[in-house]
Image (cartoon, grey):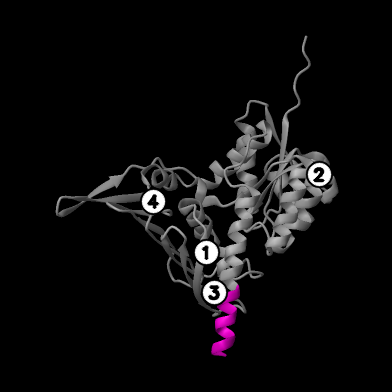
Amino acid sequence: MEPSKQPFRIGVAGVGAIGKNHARILAEIAAKSDGGVTFAAVYDADAARAADFATQYHTQAASDLADFATRVDAATVAVPTIYHRPVAEPLMQQGVHVLVEKPISESYSEAQAMIALAQEKNVILQVGHIERFNPVLRQLEERMNQPRFIEAHRLSPFPNRSMDIGVVLDVMIHDIEIVLHLVKSPLIQIDAVGIPVLTKREDIANARLKFANGCIANITASRISPEKLRKIRVFQQDSYLSLDYQEQSGWIYRKDGMQIVREEVEVEKDEPLKLEIAAFVECARQGKRPIVSGQEGAEAVRIALEITDQIEKNAALAG
């Protein structure tokens, strides 16, 4: 009789505003796995919070990060950005696969150090750029060829979280990563502006990115808007796509003779975070390359920091 395989152990580090949803989804994945996956542990700097979530999802609260590392084979890291590296690195040192929420780090050098460690320890390092798992993006990828102009807007009310970073690293980075993924050409010029309103860092920003292949991307992000908006438009030679990440809907506009015809894009709606975490667990179990690797997350940080630096320099000149 063959010995039964041990279940693959998953867990979450950080169960705050974002991590609480990670916990819910990890519990769902384990429940649907027919014993192949178990939601093994929760860790949070607030022990009482960790205990509450452990009780809610019938798992264990780790006493500290070292204890957590012994209890899991793969973990999502949903702590504030400044703690990404201090939390993720000890886990990877112990051979734990990690999904780190975006941005991967505050600095490009830190991100590279995390990537190097993941390679050394032969573990999966995925970055939580959630829109790459939004069903509308799949529709865009299927219909896209040589984008010439991309316009993205991402607006939201003030979140009262992520105060350690500005709107570029907090919000705009989603669209930066998507644009880099879509265009696949060297970035040759950045023009950016941003202003602080409620925090010491920029709360609203615009960046115009020019690529070597001639494509231009115009990206606007705000975390002080009265409404939530997450839209992208991609213009090509003979058509353009207008997609709404939030509503998971979209339209494609095509040239038909001297007229423009509009066609609705059919989208099979789903929860992007669920798809993202499920993909991570599958990559960790199978040793597959993640859809958003550490290097892709690091490149998004590099460009975001260049934008932030330009915003700060412009502010100083206007000073």
Please rate how many residues cluster around mark 2, counting C-alpha atoms within 10 Å: few if below 14, some from 14 to 19, many from 20.
many
Question: Which amino acid, by three-letter code, is at mark 4?
Answer: Gln
Mark before the other along the chain sequence, 2 or 4: 2
Q: Is residue 102 visible?
A: no
Which residue lies under the disc numbered 2?
Answer: 69
Q: Which residue sits at x=60%, y=37%? A: 28
Q: Distance between the residues labelled 1 and 4?
A: 22 Å
Question: Which amino acid, by three-letter code, is at mark 3?
Answer: Asp
Instruction: Using the image, tell me which numbered label, if any, was put on residue 172.
Output: 1
Q: Main secondary structure of the magenta part?
A: helix
Q: Distance between the residues labelled 3 and 4?
A: 32 Å
Mark before the other along the chain sequence, 3 or 4: 4
Q: What element carries label 1?
A: helix
Residue 311 is inside the magenta segment: yes
Of residues 308 and 77, which is closer to you in this image?
308
Which residue lies under the disc numbered 4?
Answer: 146
The magenta segment is 309-319
Which residue lies under the disc numbered 3?
Answer: 203
